Image (cartoon, grey):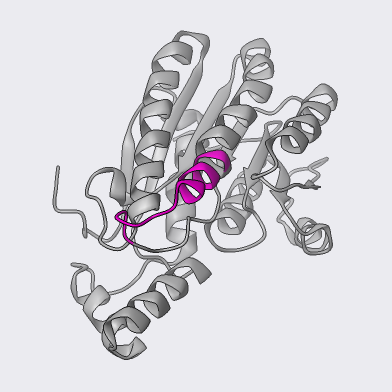
Amino acid sequence: MDLDLTGKHALVCGASQGIGLAAARALAALGANVTLLARREDILRELAGQLPAPREGQSHGWIAADSADTDALRAKVEALVAAKPVHILVNNSGGPPPGTVHGAQIAAFEAAYRQHLIANHVLAEAVIPGMERDGYGRIVNVISTSVKEPLQGLGVSNTTRWAVASWAKTLATEVAAKGITVNNVLPGSTETPRIEQIIGNTASKTGRSREEVFEKMVGEIPMRRFARPEETAAAIAFLCSPAASYITGVNLPVDGGRTRSL
């Protein structure tokens, strides 16, 4: 199985922690030159220096940018690809705050769409020309199992994630003949700061303890545990590899079997 990413350049968003950082490490271990993208330059500089570099000449870098500021994001990524085309794009960003869809403010939807759907589109538009020229392109969007089954208490997130999934499926069809694949990885409950936020919000609203909320969430997962970020990253890395060249337009749950739908 060909998993070798030597000579490929990967841009990984939300790469300062959690699934994004784990994905960057997995891609680097397969030989890719990785550019980390997140908001804090000091953290990114340190993390880039710690990424694996098993191939001769392999190097890593970073871009400090906020996905909510799409104009600045576009400018920085266009400058990056002008110097070094991107062959792999991992779209990943923290989810909108928990809450019901009823009563959600219009501004919450607008902010979520800009941070996720619009930012993903801006990044894809910037990197696709280079993918076309080099004959290799992988776009992986890290979204949520809510695109298959909406999750209670995540109204704005459910709505936004489904929009990203629809955008990705449409894009996958349009660029498939150019050697570019577009896929979505759907994490379930994963050991990240996001899951701590969800547990805390649920505990506050229900009056249950954090331990009770945790046990209930774990009890709904057939594997009886949350995912480790590295497990989700492994799925991302595979979809970015040459071995996944004939897989495009799919939604891949990495959720320990929690999603009950097909």
Query: Which quarter of the picture shows residue 5?
Result: top right
Residue 153, given in percent of the width and then of the height, sits at 30, 63
Residue 46 relative to residue 95: left or right: right
In reply to whether residue 106 is colored magenta, the answer given is: yes
Quarter of the image with the N terminus is: top left
> Does 251 sit above or below residue 87?
below
> Does 126 sit above or below residue 92?
above
Of 102 and 52, nearer the camera is 102
Of 115 and 240, nearer the camera is 115
Residue 248 visible to an observer of this rendering:
no
| Residue range highlighted in magenta | 100-114
Quarter of the image with the C terminus is: top left
Residue 47, given in percent of the width and then of the height, sits at 75, 61
Q: Residue at coordinates 32% horizontally, 42% vertically from top-left?
A: 252
Of 51 and 90, nearer the camera is 90
Residue 208, given in percent of the width and then of the height, sits at 28, 88
